[in-house]
Image: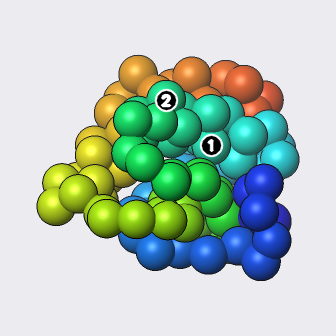
C-alpha cells in the first residue's frame, strides 16, 4: 500500500524500517503525517509512504518527491523520525497493534 498525494508515487529520497504490524492504512497515514511535519520546510517536498506486509510485521519505506534541491541531511532526518521510539509507539497504537513491541 502506498499513501501519496501525487501519482505516480516517486521516491527521490527515502529511508526504511520494519514494524511489528497493525492496520497498514492507518500506519501509513500516521507516518506520512509525521514525515510532512519533519520535512515541510523543504521546498517542493511531497511525502510518500509505502507499507508492505511481510512475515512477522510490515516493511515501511518513507520519503518522497522533491521538486528542487535535496538537502544533504534529508535522508538522515527521515531515518531519525523512523527510529524514534516515541513515534514508533504512537504509530503502533494508532494502527491498532496489540502485540509486544
Residue 85 point in image, percent of width and height = 36, 29
Nearer the observer, disc 1 or disc 2? Answer: 2
Residue 81 point in image, percent of width and height = 37, 39
Asked whether 85 or 8 is in front, the reply is: 8
Q: Secondary structure beneath disc 2?
A: helix
Disc 1 to disc 2, C-alpha distance: 9 Å
Residue, x 40% and y 65% (percent of image)?
Answer: 68
Asked whether 61 or 56 is in front, the reply is: 61
Residue, x 75% and y 57% (percent of image)?
Answer: 4
Asked whether 67 or 90 is in front, the reply is: 67
Residue, x 73% and y 40% (percent of image)?
Answer: 29
Can you see residue 87? Answer: yes
Q: Is residue 77 left or right of residue 35?
A: left
Residue of label 1:
32
Q: Secondary structure beneath disc 1?
A: helix
Residue of label 2:
37
Amino acid at each position: 500500500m502506498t499513501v501519496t498525494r501525487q501519482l505516480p508515487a516517486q521516491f527521490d529520497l527515502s529511508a526504511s524500517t520494519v514494524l511489528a504490524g497493525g492496520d497498514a492504512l492507518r500506519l501509513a497515514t500516521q507516518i506520512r503525517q509525521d514525515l510532512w511535519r519533519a520535512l515541510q520546510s523543504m521546498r517542493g517536498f511531497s511525502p510518500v509512504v509505502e507499507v508492505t506486509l511481510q512475515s512477522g510485521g510490515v516493511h515501511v519505506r518513507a520519503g518522497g518527491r522533491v521538486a528542487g534541491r535535496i538537502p544533504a541531511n534529508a535522508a538522515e532526518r527521515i531515518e531519525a523520525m523512523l527510529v524514534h521510539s516515541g513515534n514508533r509507539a504512537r504509530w503502533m497504537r494508532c494502527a491498532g497493534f496489540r502485540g509486544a513491541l
